[in-house]
Image (cartoon, rainbow, N blue to C red):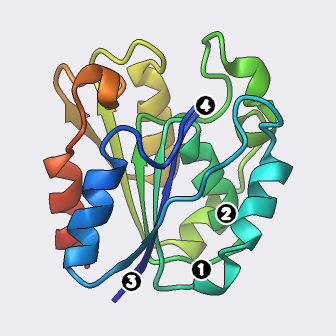
Amino acid sequence: MANIFIFHGVGGHPKENWFPWLKEQLEKLGHQVFIPQFSTPEDQTLENWMKVLDEYRNHLNENSILIGHSLGVPFALNIIEKYPVQSAFLVAGFTGLADNEFDNGMETFAQHQFDWAKIKANCKKFFVFHSDNDPYIKLEKAEELASNLRVDVILVKGGGHLNEGAGYTRFELLLEKISLSL
């Protein structure tokens, strides 16, 4: 069974959105699921988040699955640049500028040139989920991300930021895609 990591976004925590529900569903299937708590928005830097990840380093391997939401997406990409993993599920994410009020706290994560060749070499399966009405991250950012990864965007109609505020305490489509990829 896989070790699965779920990474929250700005101001996030392990008990929000669809994270607890997804963790429960994946554990029922026999997987080990980790949802680290990262410093946010205070002390929110890639370096600080990587220090937290170091506590889980012995569970991160080529059979691991990464799931990132919002800022968790560029965080997952930074991890994949360093470590091989099985697959990545990128939800409501971006690279570069998000073009919103949170950009100043996200520069170390997203505002640099990613090594797409290395990322694709370290992870063979990518899934990019995005809504057509995300109030924080424009659809064009997901399309750019998907293009860099050479995959299509899995478009969720009317899903907002695919978070609890948009009604997402469960995310059946994500669970389905994870189950099919195993």
**Sequence-wise, which precedes: disc 4 or disc 3?**
3
**Sequence-wise, which precedes: disc 4 or disc 1?**
4
Q: Which secondary structure, mark 3?
A: loop
- Disc 3 marks which amino acid? Ala
Numbered circle sitting on residue 2: 3
Category of crowding for the residue at label 2, using alpha-carbon neighbours closer than 10 angstroms: few (below 14), some (14–19), many (at least 20): some
Residue 174 spot, x, y in % from top left: 23, 52
Q: Which residue is mark 2?
A: 79
Q: Which residue is mark 4?
A: 10
Residue 115 spot, x, y in % from top left: 71, 56
Contact, CB < 8 Å: mark 2 with mark 1?
yes
- Disc 2 marks which amino acid? Ile
Q: Which residue is mark 1?
A: 60
Residue 83 spot, x, y in % from top left: 67, 75
Q: CA distance from mark 4 to mark 3?
A: 26 Å
Q: CA distance from mark 2 to mark 3?
A: 17 Å
Nearest the eye: 161 or 111 = 161
Q: CA distance from mark 2 to mark 1?
A: 10 Å
Category of crowding for the residue at label 3, using alpha-carbon neighbours closer than 10 angstroms: few (below 14), some (14–19), many (at least 20): many
**Sequence-wise, which precedes: disc 2 or disc 1?**
1
